[in-house]
Amino acid sequence: MSSRNILVINSGSSSIKFALVNEHSEQFLVQGLAERLGSEDAVLEWELDGEKQVDKLPNADHREAFAHLLPLVKKASDGRLTGIGHRVVHGGAHFTKASALTPEVIDVIERAAVLAPLHNPPGLIGIEAAMDLYPDLPQIAVFDTAFHQTMPAHAYRYAVPEELYSEHHVRRYGFHGTSHMYVSRKAAEMTGLPVDDSCWLTAHLGNGCSTTAVVNGESLDTSMGLTPLEGVVMGTRSGDVDPSLHNHLARTLGWDTQKIETVLTKESGLLGLSGLSNDMRTLIEAREKGHERATLAIEVFCYRLAKSLAAMACALPRLDGLIFTGGIGENASLIRSKTLDYLRLFDFKLDEAANQACIRGKSGLISAENHPRVLVIPTNEERQIAIETLASIDANAK
Ligand code: ADP
């Protein structure tokens, strides 16, 4: 058995998430997180052979964190590392699949930063640090947007003047592509349907949330748009609002665009509605104790999610199944059942025992017999990034 290992990196402004993935295993050889980088409290935490360990790295930056990662990765991979896969949030319309990090590719990622100012620049810091430290290893960028590049124009265009699209790249891109791709392929595997002849609705529900219509292995529509703010209600993001809300807030409250963006991305969603938390676990517990705003937040979340799934169904010729994933989708049986209650016309019906049983990483079918299929499938974005990284390395070797 060949045993190729890929180091998967997800670099944020003050953090680096990493996982060492073997192509033949769903389990990671080592995984961890360097966080609070650039501050006195910077730490590197990792889990190896089931044991959690922490190293303090006061004032370490991304490069120093990588330098500490290296021995861990070497040890866990027995010195056999085939390449590094970097998660990049926005690839613009340029990338339809993972790409080797050449100077030209880095240049395009830099130019796409205008579309993802919070995400692409920290991603590039991680890429630069890793390329500096591992100059001889293949390094591949895997884009959140690439899977959605198969959307037809009628799904990705906004009804705004043509020049905004042709000259300023204003269009819908979609995100969470690696997750939607991973779970739709898993669903095909679990049900015995061919990937290229299967139709899915996918709901990725983590801190960020999005829905996608996947037909024959391709994304045909998705709820996020130009940025990851469009679409369904999320932990702290509003999702869809009336586009005139911005003007209204500027006129009536004197807010500038920065303030409006902060409110809609960091203070809205479940947190804004509940006034309590962006964490679904906390809201479910509060609802059980009769907390009115938590109850409303959950109701709005489920109703908007159902509306989005119904809208996504416009892209499907038939439905082979609805898939829940992400921390909420994988664990919150209440949210799954409430969302389906709002989709009565689709004839969904849950097997409640199966719904309750699918938590903490357990995947399975949760629909009642003779009703449309509903699946819970834990996402594994790191594994999908590793698979795409290896495919890109193999393609480049030919
Ligand atoms: P991220 O997008 O940061 O990767 P996750 O996919 O881990 O986020 O999802 C985080 C969300 O999942 C949080 O809202 C959290 O409350 C929710 N979640 C995790 N476990 C449970 C659970 N047992 N019940 C309900 N919600 C849960």
Image (cartoon, rainbow, N blue to C red):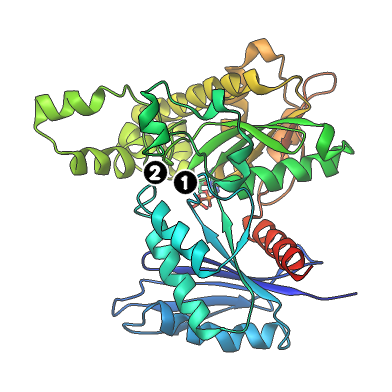
Q: Position of residue 347 (x, y in %)?
A: 72, 14
* Numbered marks: total: 2
Q: Nearer the viewer, residue 145 or 355?
A: 145
Q: Specify whether 9 is left or right of 184.
A: left
Quadrant holding the C terminus:
bottom right
Residue assigned mark 2: 278
Q: Quadrant of residue 69?
A: bottom right
Q: What's under tag 2, amino acid-wise?
A: Asn
Q: Quadrant of residue 159?
A: top left
Q: Position of residue 283 (x, y in %)?
A: 43, 38
Quadrant holding the N terminus:
bottom right
Q: Determine if the C-beta at disc 1 is less than 8 A from ligand 1.
A: yes
SS of the residue at dot 1? loop
Q: Nearer the viewer, residue 38 or 258?
A: 258
Q: Residue at x 70, y 62 (%)?
A: 392
Q: Position of residue 241 (x, y in %)?
A: 34, 25
Q: Which mark is residue 207?
A: 1
Mark 2 touches mark 1? (CB < 8 Å): yes
